[in-house]
Amino acid sequence: NNVVSSLIDAVADTFPVTQELVGEEFFRAMASVFVRQHPPRSRVLAHYGGAFADFVDGFEPARAVPYLADVARLERARVLAHHASDADPLTAETLGVAMSSGEDLGALQLVCHPSTSVVLSGYAIVSVWAAHQGDGDLSDMDPAVPESALVVRLGLDVLVLRLPPGAARFVIALQTGAGLADASALAAGEAADFELPKVLALLLGHGALISVQLPGSHFQ
């Protein structure tokens, strides 16, 4: 019982907003089922809970809060960002040099910071998470509005940013090695109003990019 209680505490530490959304009693009962089905495989409890969001997705009593699993995914992404490797962010000046180098701009590959991740959701997970940080009011928002989150660590701070339309697909494409042209095309295919300069400014301004590469070249 002591072991199970400690594991439940570890899950609660990782998913505090998820717990607030359903209340401590419900959360601990749900986490109790989870820890029995998914015992830890590492002694480092800070890494425990990787399967929790998927578990919540299939936990029938939690279906009354349909965005609960995606909020858990967002909180898990914050933990992973906190523990990700350090890397110096790409500067706007360096990106400018690369883009004015005369090389094929479409082939440029932008490399994301190791802490960078995107959480896609059909619900307003960024707004819900922010409201629990004192930024906004849950009663004033529609949780059924889709939002995509960018999670990235800037210095010691883990940021959660709402991405504009198409930007989430753009970042995901960058992380799979797509060049600037292909990533932009994918984003524009999802959102006709996708604006590359604004998205690049957002990523640069929050340290989400660390280098820009071309075959045979490297700018950092």
Image (tube, rainbow, N blue to C red):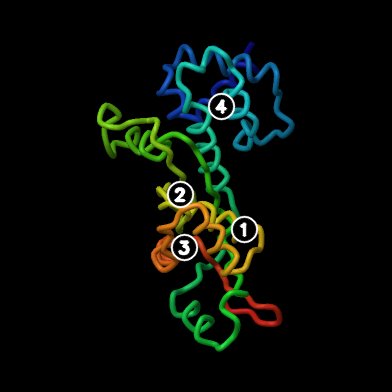
Residue 87 screen position, x and y as percent: 56, 64
**Earlier-in-chain disc, 2 versus 3:** 2
Within-10-Å neighbours for mark 2: few <14, some 14–19, many 20+: some
* Residue shown at 57% from the left, 23% from the top: 56
Looking at the rendered structure, the kind of residue marked 3 is Gly
Give the secondary structure at mark 2.
Answer: strand
Give the quarter of the figure containing the N terminus. top right
Q: What whole-number distance in Å separates the C-alpha atoms at marks 1 and 3?
A: 15 Å
Mark pair 4, 2: CA separation: 19 Å
Q: Residue at x 43, y 38 (%)?
A: 146
Q: Nearer the viewer, mark 1 or mark 2?
A: 1
Q: Nearer the viewer, residue 107 or 185?
A: 185
Whether residue 154 sits left or right of residue 32 in the image: it is left
Judged from the image, the secondary structure of the residue bearing numbered disc 1 is: helix
Mark 4 belongs to which amino acid?
Answer: Val
Contact flag, marks 1 and 2 (Cβ < 8 Å): no
Number of callouts in the render?
4
Q: Reading the chain from its start, which is encountered first: label 4 or label 1?
A: 4
Left or right of 163 on screen, residue 58: right
Residue at label 1? 175
Which residue bears the numbered disc 3? 207
Q: Position of residue 79 (x, y in %)?
A: 54, 41
Labels 4 & 3 near each other (Cβ < 8 A):
no
For label 2, the residue is 158
| Image marks 4 and 2: residues in contact by CB distance under 8 Å | no
The first of marks 1 and 2 along the sequence is 2
Q: Label 3: how many residues lie within 10 Å, few (<14), some (14-19) or many (20+)?
A: many
Mark earlier in primary sequence (4, 2): 4
Q: Residue at x 61, y 70 (%)?
A: 109
The residue located at (63%, 14%) in the rendering is: 33
Q: Which residue is mark 4?
A: 11
Identify residue type, mark 2.
Val
